[in-house]
Image (cartoon, rainbow, N blue to C red):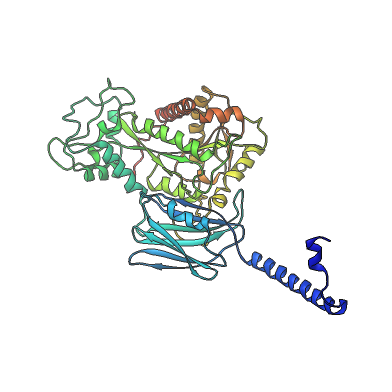
Amino acid sequence: MTADASMDHPTKTDNAYTPSRRHLLQAGSLVLLLGTQQIARGATIVAVRVWPAPEYSRVTIESDTKLVAKQFFVTTPPRLAVDIEGIDLSPELRELVAKVKPDDPNIAGIRVGQNAPGVVRLVVDLKQAAQPQVFTLPPIAAYQHRLVFDLYPAEPVDPLEALIAERLRDAGTPGHGGDKTAAAPAPAPAKAAEPADPLGDLIAQRSNRPGPSAAPSPAEPATAPAPSNVATNRAGGRATATQTDRIIIVALDPGHGGEDPGAIGPAGTREKDVVLRVAHLLRDRINATTVGGNPMRAFLTRDGDFFVPLGTRVEKARRVQADLFVSIHADAFTTPAARGASVFALSQSGASSTAARWLANKENQADLVGGLNVQSKDQHVQRALLDMSTTAQINDSLKLGTVLLGEIGNIGKLHKPRVEQAGFAVLKAPDIPSVLVETAFISNPEEEARLRSSTYQQELADALMRGITRYFAKNPPLARSRSV
């Protein structure tokens, strides 16, 4: 007889033992039942993430079941306290403390502790007054349940102000550039007839720089740095709109970001990372280019790894009064055989192909994956897609897409030889020619390797730059006036 067996051997009569055994079995069942209920009520923390950005910082707590939380905000000093119910403090939650970066624009630090049995309190200390939003997201794609804290500055970041500040920073200090007396370029007559550019006037006023507009001479290269064209006034007078260069703004929209990685290649390459690098390269080229003597300026809808709702991307491009909108992506399909780049414009009457419709539906789900607070009415997260796109906007978009497609075809394979159309939400600015560029199929191992290559990224940025320049050569934006 084994030791285990001896533990089951009765020490009293069978009649006396039988009730005792039944009671033990019942007690064991009760323990199992309580354990099951406790597991069902609780939650296991799967991961924690912090996404810092000037526009807002996000904290995400991912769990295997939905979390229940109560929050309150303290204004002095500014901090958000959240009580998460039904869980105990875990190593995963403690990781949040170390995930806050010193350069986070909004979060000074995070504290976590067991506030009460089954209640964990999380306190987010803020660097400035904020408008916090706390909401939950159901499972989607690779994510389980998510509890999200979005911390927006009380004074929202104005993309137009940011663009002006960047323009002035690159222009240098007062007096930079000396006394330029270069002759006016060939298109000067058309420029003189152009309506006032209030954006340029505002930049000139804020620069506090003397001197009239210094246009590059015809001998200067077409890609002369934009700072050489900043308005100055040698007579010492205040700059005016007529003395200010016409700034051409191109909105670059790197797809996905933050909680939304986009497509992921066989080797683990994330779409959001590749397209952001390409956008940075293209921004450098745009900022160093002039068209007809007018400096170009690139504006990125996201300049880092954070989530931007689709409608907000459109709104930001309109806020800076962009002349073009180029959304950059890297496609994926269910099989690795698909390959080649594509360019898409908006369609008001259905997709041009089944594949285009499928892709548009997939890209339009970015808000669900990235995590949009659908209950919020805040303008920075409210999905407010525009449905006023005009035929003229679509025609201009097709022109832009055609030249871009031609340039991309010179460096790689095209998936389709023509610009396709579908109902992409991000292309719905009614007054901005807008295209979506699928640079390659990241799901194809060979094309994924190219997308990871810095050489190909440079080639791709060069091709897009040539296409944008070609578009403006045939469609100059000289007659358009901005209002600030």
Please tell me which residue is depicted at 46% across the width and 55% down the height of the picture: 96
User: Left or right: 388 with respect to 183?
Assistant: right
User: Left or right: 276 with respect to 200?
Assistant: right
Q: Where is residue 309 shown, x and y percent of the image?
A: 49, 50
Q: Is residue 416 visible?
A: no
Q: Residue lying farthest right?
A: 14
Q: Residue lying farthest top?
A: 219
Q: Where is residue 401 shown, x and y percent of the image?
A: 51, 32
Question: Which image quadrant: the N terminus?
Answer: bottom right
User: Left or right: 111 with respect to 423?
Assistant: left
Please tell me which residue is depicted at 38% across the width and 30% down the height of the picture: 285
Picture layout, residue 417 above or below residue 119: above
Quarter-wise, where is residue 290 in the image? top left
**Camera-side residue: 19 or 336?**
19
**Camera-side residue: 443 or 19?**
19
User: Left or right: 466 with respect to 205?
Assistant: right
Q: Is residue 405 visible?
A: yes
Q: Where is residue 217 shown, x and y percent of the image?
A: 25, 24
Q: Where is residue 249 shown, x and y percent of the image?
A: 37, 38
Picture layout, residue 119 above or below residue 192: below
